[in-house]
Amino acid sequence: MRASRKPVEPWDAELAAKLAAEALGYLARYYPECAASEALREHEEAAHEAAMDAGGEVPGGPQMLYASRSGRGPADTSGGGVSVETGNLIGLAVTLLTTAVSFYIYVMGVRYRDRALSRSAALAFLVCGAVGVWTLVRIL
């Protein structure tokens, strides 16, 4: 038995403009690095045009994005990210862990006489070891 379908409502340009403006405003407030993306340019312009068709600027709409872009720079990104030193230490810890795991897998491949496994693990061990040394040199 088929469920009855709900009739399709006509397109509400004002509601669409308002929702798009709210979404872009949310991006501008909480993810400014994404809001300034060129990938969103097409959608920003569509939301702006819809707002203009709806009779003017929508509060908190695309104009908020343009205003949030002015004055953005490295000094304006306070409180975000990880310091360089901490990032390097985390990178070193990750490379040491992956080096140890690849060495363990290499030993298991040799022990069970699995050449493909041991060779690929040896390659991973060498690459991870090289990255670990490079990261250690960057820290020191």
Image: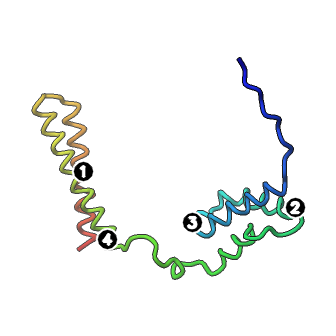
* Mark number, residue 86: 4
Q: Quadrant of residue 95?
A: bottom left
Q: Which residue is label 3 attached to?
A: 31
Q: Position of residue 57 (x, y in %)?
A: 82, 69
Query: In the rendering, at what x and y percent does residue 49 appear?
Result: 83, 61
Spatial separation of the CA atoms under disc 4 and disc 3: 23 Å
Q: Amino acid at mark 1?
A: Thr
Residue count near mark 4 (Cα–Cα under 10 Å), binned few <14, some 14–19, many ≥20: few
Kind of residue at badge 4: Thr
Checking the image for residue 37, the label placed there is none
Q: Pointer 1: what residue?
A: 98
Considering the image in quadrants, where does the C terminus appear? bottom left
Cα distance, mark 3 to mark 2?
26 Å
Asked whether disc 1 touches disc 3, contact meaning CB atoms under 8 Å apart, the reply is no
Q: Secondary structure at mark 1?
A: helix
Query: Residue 116 sits in which quadrant?
Result: top left
